[in-house]
Amino acid sequence: MTLSDDREYLSPEGLEDLEKRLKNLKTTRRVQIAERLEFAKSLGDLSENAEYSEAKEEQMVNEAEVAKLEDILSRASVISNTDSSEIRLGSNVKCRKIGNGDEQFMIVGREEANPLKGKVSNESPLGKAFLGKRKNEKVLVSTPRGQIEYSIIEIA
């Protein structure tokens, strides 16, 4: 798989999550903000109405998020990795950090990255170092604290 900078690589679950977030922002959230704006208008003078100003700000933030998600989804490329011979986007990797214990993570696109949930971006130093590697290979990752060596145990 050739990676392109303008594509947003998403797992099927990540795509579904972004679509749900977008739907919520365009429906539920817009309705809530519209109701808040109507209430604020009913309070009178809009020039000195903090409630109205806050609701307008909330509307701008919501619409910016809608535009961002629509842009991401328009450039989305769904990843599915059925090849476990080498690490690619979508691979689940089990490895051993030399001098430490075993770790497990999934290589995902930047929009889904969440290291606390074991999802590592393909653009991160860790993700870049692992791409293309195979089971039993050693991987050297450069970090701000120095180089860390990993041994690949399993690819799924």
Image (tube, grey):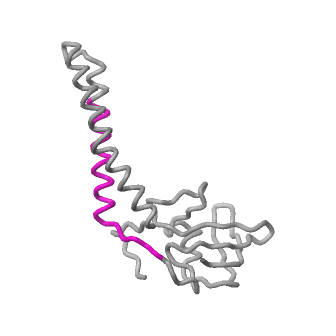
Is 61 left or right of 112, judged from the image as shown? left
Name the residue furthest right. Answer: 99
Q: Quadrant of the C terminus?
A: bottom right
| Residue in the foreground of this view, choosing between 124 and 9 | 9
Residue 122 position, x and y percent, is 50, 69
Residue 75 occupies quadrant: bottom left
At x 30%, y 32%, the residue is 32
Position of residue 73 relative to residue 28, above or below, is below
Is 137 part of what is drawn in magenta? no
Residue 56 position, x and y percent, is 26, 30
Residue 45 occupies quadrant: top left
Residue 114 position, x and y percent, is 54, 57
At x 58%, y 75%, the residue is 129
Q: Quadrant of the N terminus?
A: bottom left
Is 3 left or right of 124, judged from the image as shown? left
Q: Residues in magenta?
A: 56-80
| Residue in the foreground of this view, choosing between 17 and 99 | 17
Residue 40 occupies quadrant: top left
Q: Main secondary structure of the magenta part?
A: helix
| Residue in the foreground of this view, choosing between 40 and 60 | 40
How many marks on residues?
0
At x 34%, y 66%, the residue is 76
Position of residue 73 relative to residue 84, above or below, is above
Residue 112 position, x and y percent, is 47, 60
Is 66 part of what is drawn in magenta? yes
At x 28%, y 56%, the residue is 70
Position of residue 104 relative to residue 39, above or below, is below
Is 130 left or right of 19, judged from the image as shown? right
